[in-house]
Image: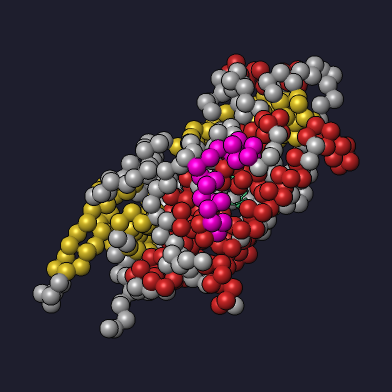
Amino acid sequence: RGVRPPPTRIAIIGAGIGGTSAAYFVRQKFGNNVPIDVFEKGDVGGRLATVEIEGNEYEAGGAVIHPLNLHMKKFVEELGLSARPPTSSLVGIYNGKEFVFEESSWFIINLIKMVWYHGLNFPRMYMWVEEMLDKFMRVYRYQTSDYSFTSVEAMLNALGGNEFLQRLNKTVDETMQQAGFSQKFIDEMVTPVMRVNYGQGVQINGFVGAVSLAGTDSGLWAVNGGNKVVCTGLLYASKANLIKGTVTSVEEKIRPLRTGEGSVHLYQVNYNTDSGESYSQYDIIIVATPLNSGMSGIRFPFSVPAVKNPYHQTVATFVKGKINRSFFGCPEPCSLQLTEILTMDDPNLFFSSIGVVTPVKVKTDQPLRDSANDPVWKVFSPEPLTEQQLGLLFTSHGAVKSKTWLAYPNYHPPERVPPVVLNERIYYISSIEIAASAMEMSALSAKNVALLAHHQWYENTDKIDQEDLNEKIKSEL
Ligand SMILES: CC(C)=CCC/C(C)=C/CC/C(C)=C/CSC[C@H](N)C(=O)O
C-alpha cells in the first residue's frame, strides 16, 4: 500500500484562539504544501477582543492566562510577543448589603482573616486545584508524543480517569461539599470566583469550577498588546488564507475519479462575503466556532448532538469614573481601597463583578494607575446596564462602552458533551468548552484535532484513543 497523498485543501471555520491555533498546528502536522483556508465572519481573535476608551484598549473577552498554560506560553514565545502581568488588586466580596471579606494590602492580615473566617478551607482549596492541575498537565506530554482523542470524554479520562469524567456530572457546589469544603466557604469565596469568571454561580460543573479556581492562582498574565494578537500572529505564522465571510452551510459532494475507478468524497463550504455567495471544496473541515443555537447558524448534512443550549450572555461594560462607595455601604469620606469587587449570589444584584482594569499595552512612560485621572472600571453583568444602574454604581463618569458576549456555555451538569468528530473528516474544536471554556482549553483542543485529523488521514490508529496512556508514556520514556 502506497503512502496516501496529503489532503488537497483544509478549511477552518472561525479565527478565534481555537481556529488560529488549529491553523498553526495543522500547518505543523500537514506541512507547507497543503492550502489552509480560515473563514471568519467577524474580527480575527473572536472572543479575545478589546474595547477602546479614550485612546487605550482594554481586554473585553478572554482576559487571563495561567502560568502553566503551556500552549499559550509557547505561542507568545514563538511569535516574539511578550507577557503583561495583571494589575495587582485589592479584592472585596459583597453580598448585596455589605462586604463579607475585604482584602488588606498586608499579607499577614489577609492570612489571619482567611483562617479566622474559613479555617483551613483556603489552603485545602489550593491543594485541591493543584492536584487537578497536575493531572491536567499530562496533556502536554500526550500531545508532544502525538497522541490524540476522538472525544472530550476520552481526553479527560486519559488525564484524570473517572474522577475527571465525574466532574462533568456534578455541580462544583456538590463536588466541593463532598470533598469536605464548608458551605460558608463555597458561598462566600467560591461563588464569587465562578460569577466573575463564568457569569454563573456554583451550579456550574465541577471541572469548569476547578479551572475557574485555578484562575485565582498567582502569576496570571495576559499578552502585551492584547490577547488577540496571538490569533493574528498564529494566522500569519500558519500562512493560512483568511476568508472574511459567513459560512452558511457544509455539503457533502461525491466526485467520480477521472480514471473511472471509484470516487472522492469532498465537503463543500458555502459562504457569503461582501462580494456575494461563493463556495470552495475541502478534504478536511475543522469547526472552531460554537454550533449552539443563536451562534454560528451553519447547516450541516447531519444533525450535531448536544449543541441545543444557547451560550451564556455576559455583558462587559467599561466605565471611566468614580465608583459610588456609599452604594457598597461606605458613605464618603470612605477609606475603602478595593479595586476588585466580586459578588455572592443575590437575586437583587444586577452585576456580578466590578474591577479596575489597565490598558493592554504596557507603556513604560505611563504609571499603571494614575491617581490624577479616574480609573477605568470593567463591570460584568448578565444584561446591559441601564443609566439608572450606572448612576447607582458611579458618582460621576465619563466614557462608557459595552460589549455583549455569548461568552461560554450555560453550564448545567450532568453535561451532554458534543462530539469532536462531527462526521468523517469534520472536526469540532469548540466541544471542549462544555468541560471548560478558556484560551488554553481551545488551544489544546485545536492541537488534539490537528493530530487526530492527521492520524485519521494517514490511518495511524496507534496514536488515537490509547488506553492507559499515562503508564504507556512512562514506559516509552
Ligand atoms: C484542571 C485545572 C484545574 C486547570 C486547567 C488549566 C487551565 C485551563 C487554567 C486556566 C485558568 C484560568 C486562567 C481561568 C480563568 S477563567 C477563564 C476566563 N473566562 C477567561 O478566559 O478569561
Magenta stretch: helix, strand or loop mostly? helix
Please provide the residue range marked out in magenta.
159-178
Near-viewer residue (70 or 128): 128
Q: Give coordinates of residue 370: x percent, y percent.
A: 78, 37
Near-viewer residue (84 or 449): 449
Q: Give coordinates of residue 379: x percent, y percent.
A: 62, 30
User: Residue 367: in sight, yes or no?
Assistant: yes
Q: Is residue 172 magenta?
A: yes
Q: Residue at x 75, y 35 (%)?
A: 91
Q: Is residue 335 above or below residue 118?
A: above
Near-viewer residue (328 or 397): 328
Colour pattern of the rendering: secondary structure
Near-viewer residue (462 or 268): 462
Quadrant of the rendered structure where residue 212 is?
top right
36 lies left or right of 366: left
Q: Residue at x 59, y 57 (%)?
A: 136
Q: Give coordinates of residue 108: x percent, y percent.
A: 89, 41
Q: Is residue 27 above or below residue 396?
A: below
Q: Residue at x 19, y 59 (%)?
A: 253
